[in-house]
Image (tube, rainbow, N blue to C red):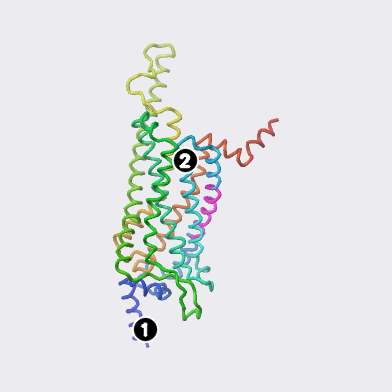
Amino acid sequence: MHSTQTKSNDSLKEMVITQDPVWLLNHCDECLSLDNSPKPFLNDEQLDIVSLVLISFIQLFNIIGLVGNILSIAVFIKLGFSEPSHISLLSLAASDLACVVLSIWTNLCFIPAFRDLRLPFHAINITTLTGAGLWSFIVRTVAWITAFISFERCLCILAPLKVKRYITPKTTFTAMLLIAALTICPSFLIYIRWHFVWMFYPHLNATILDVIPIDNKYYILLATIVKYICGVLQPLLAFAIVVLCTFFLIVQLRKVSSWRKSVTSGEHRWGQNSEEKPTPNAPGRNTISQKEERLVRLVVVIATVFIVCFTPTSLQLLFSSLFEGFFYFGFYRRIYFVVQLITFLGEAVSGAMNILIYYNMSSKYRFTLRRLIGLENQEQKSKI
């Protein structure tokens, strides 16, 4: 009996390592209970505990992000579309909101107690297409919108007059549409390989909704190409652009700060009426206005938060491309699942923090938000 069970486990391990997608989806429960190594990263009980803790934090930040991004969308619509930055920040808030909604659904399906319910669908497999898969598409959009905002601020510093002629509300709106089209639409090509089907599970004695892949070599090739181009190269390239642009903006802000300190100390040393004090036309004067500087600081903070929160996602994409078994039903499935939850947590934190960043760093946003929720009117009434 023991030898028979050992042979059965060996055959299961072999099938997991070979990653036969049809077999994996039809026997996913055996895969989840299979111990792939003598010393696993986490056993099933520990994995459930870690998952529950991470999912609790994710859902908390998701709720904050849900409310915050809805308010941000309302504020930017109220501010109007005369400024290109309002359009790009509105697009960022809308993308974050979509990520939050998909993350709430996906993480609900990841909760062990929810998975154990007798649902009419296979929670993990269904959410792979309806939740986590779509979430990964929108995250790429968030990455590229952040890259666009950062790059546009860099151009405003390098060539302010030329940029203002070309970066208009119309061109910004067009850029947002192109980013959405190029990051989301090609990714749906992966879906042509997957079908929703009703499948009978003997251990449940029930027929439930599931997904199965079409074993077609052309579909597999197309899905692989799209995966590496849209799923790995696109987000990692956007991440690199954000990092480089943020570094450039930080350097420029330091130059501005140093120049302002030198002007202030010069005025103090020479006196207000001295002919030798620095003037606005003095050599080395930085061309960034105070309004532009405030916007650059806002973009730097947004980009920095994005870099910190998107780093787990970048590592996950990199490891997925380097290690064959680094996926949900693969050899490193436990590590992958924990990293996947951390990526959800990072995006949830990023989406929740944006409203706090806008509120603390933009007086126009703060005033509009307070009027929108009625705080400004109440303060005026109390003064009267």
Report if residue 336 lies within the magenta region: no
Marks 2 and 1, how far apart at CA:
61 Å
Q: Position of residue 137 (x, y in %)?
A: 41, 55
Nearer mark to the viewer, of 2 and 1: 2
Q: Position of residue 82 (x, y in %)?
A: 49, 35
Disc 2 designates what residue? 87
Local secondary structure at mark 1: helix
Locate the N terminus by quadrant: bottom left
Q: Is residue 48 above or below residue 91?
A: below
Dominant secondary structure of the residues highlighted in magenta in the image: helix
Q: Is residue 379 above or below residue 284?
A: below
Locate the C terminus by quadrant: top right
Disc sitting over residue 380 in the figure: none
Quadrant of the rendered image containing residue 193:
bottom left
**Amino acid at circle 1:** Gln
Residue 259 visible at all: yes
Determine the residue located farthest toward the right in the rendered image.
Answer: 384
Determine the residue located farthest toward the bottom in the rendered image.
Answer: 1
Residue 307 visible at all: no
Q: Position of residue 39 (x, y in %)?
A: 35, 70
Magenta stretch: give its range.
55-69
Q: Residues within 10 Å of mark 2 (few under 14, many from 20)?
A: many
Mark 2 vs mark 1: which is more N-terminal?
1
Report if residue 68 lies within the magenta region: yes
Q: Residues within 10 Å of mark 1 (few under 14, many from 20)?
A: few
Q: Nearer the viewer, residue 234 or 107?
A: 234
Quadrant of the rendered image containing residue 17:
bottom left
Q: Nearer the viewer, residue 72 or 257?
A: 72
Q: Residue at x 33, y 46 (%)?
A: 240
Disc 1 designates what residue? 5
